[in-house]
Image (cartoon, coloured by chain):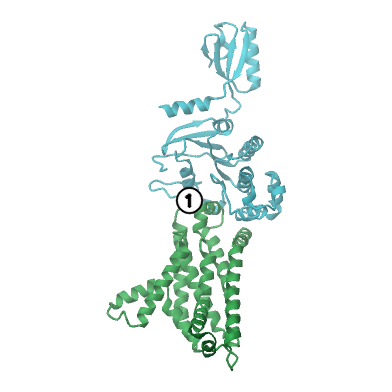
Amino acid sequence: MKGTLALAWLELYTRRRRIAALLLFGLLYLIGALTVRAVGIGEHGQVEPDALQNFGGYPLVSAFLLLGWSIGRYPLVIILVLVGGLFSTDAYAGYARLYAATRVRLITLYGFRLALLMVVAFVMSSVLLPIFDFIILGKLSSPQLLVLVGCYILVFGSITALFSVFTRADAWCTLFAWITAMIWAALGRGGFVTNVPDAVVQGITVVLPPQHALNAIEDAFGNVMPTPWGAVLYVCMYAALMLLVSGYLLSRREI
Amino acid sequence: MALREVSLTIPRGRITAVIGPNGAGKSTLFGLVLGFLRPTSGDVTIEDSEPRHYVHEHGVGYISERFSLPPGWPVDRAIAALGGLNGLPPSRIDETLGSFGLSEHRHKSVGSLSRGLLQRLGLAQAFAARRDLIVLDEPAIGLDPEWRIKLRDCMTAQRDEGRTVLLASHDLDEVERIADTIIMLEAGAVKDILDTAGSHTATGFRIQLAHVFARVSDIFPDAVVDGASFSTTVRDAEDLNNRLAALIDIGGRIVGVTPDTARLEDRVRRELDT
């Protein structure tokens, strides 16, 4: 256990530059939020699109909306940057063989690392997003935000871990899967897949990241509705399945 | 390189060396022994266990060919982590660093080490946990002569303590000095297996006489006579001196004694030529 802990510490130490870059990236959002607040605060103490429209016209409103949308993807960005290369880099560089020659199973070693990186991603997101919301809305976010952050980290951390068993382009593959799921979910919402056989729709929806469930959680948070626990459970089960498959394949693959 | 029709038993408590040209399959063989690779046919067992099971139960001291670690890792923490995975207690980290001349480099990052220091770090983590099986893939790469000698001493010490050392090397002189069994691989197949156990102190010599002497075989029964000189093998220095004294007593006149050091190299040349 001591060796696993020491190695996990080294993992964070190795990724300290990535973490610093992510913090700086988050800082940019906060600076953006402060700027928007300075020029667009309304009479209720929160940023008002009308006030932004009056100050900077449509481009400023668009920038504000983009800022708000993209900060919601910050957990995804963090998890891609931190978990990318989790196993694939070690396999490529030959470090995995060194670890595999010890008494600690690779599944334990990388499982522990993944959990640690997920916790770091969760903590960073859970600090940045509420601060951003506080600046924009002038009040604290509801705890639902943490559920949303946790779901994003679970889903995309587990998918990246799965891809990492096969390819060094693990983070890119996850990004591609996420974009595909977004498009698929949008097509579903827009009623563009009504002519597709139901089994095909269901199959594609199950294989792709559960964007519909994430959207449901995000919508509930945005509209101050109760947390859709069914969607949360679906996300957790999807992540658990990804982790199980990753662990199985890791234990079976050649190094 | 794929291996084919390889059937081997690696004896416990001995040093077994695997030699062969680049691409002969040495690293593949080690990958199979350690469970990194799975055989497409046949099986590999260590003490009746599947390799990965054995490694998880007992751990293995291992250094890979072209050993490297993430360049940002501090040396002492690298030893603590890798040793820790194999059961090295924290109290022995300082001792391990000292044994491999790394104490003064302990706070340096791995990326700032020279090739030789990096190799010593790899050897330190391989030997530190004192596992029963130690697998060394080209362990002498980058080492200076002093550390090559220390590596040899370290390997023989492990054998003397009952551990099994599996070694791949291109250094035939080194292999001949320390290995008990030498496996020659070529193109994925075993070309020959030489059992040299107990012969490390039995040294070959070429002895030059002042003139042709018919009674050489009275003293050196295995002598291969070639005119006024002959080749022979003795157990040790005392055996050599006793026999030379006996030869002189019966009338032999010695003008030169030369160690016959390149037997393995000659053997490899012959095998690879055929």
Disc 1 marks which amino acid? Phe
Q: Is residue A243 above or below residue A36?
A: above
x and y percentages locating residue A191 in the rendered image: 33, 83
* Left/right of residue A100 with respect to residue B43 in the rendered view: right
* Left/right of residue B58 with respect to residue B193 in the rendered view: right
* Left/right of residue B184 with respect to residue B93 in the rendered view: left
Please state the chain letter of the residue tagged with numbered disc 1 in the rendered image.
B
Q: Residue at x 61, y 26 (%)?
A: B201
x and y percentages locating residue A53 in the rendered image: 51, 87
The residue pinned by badge 1 equals B36
Chain that the image shows in cyan: B
Visible in this render: residue A63? yes
Q: Give the position of the N terminus of chain B as an image quadrant.
A: top left
B11, A221: nearer the viewer: A221
Query: How dense is the environment of label 1, judged by Cα within 10 Å: few (below 14), some, or many (20 and up)?
Result: many
Chain that the image shows in green: A
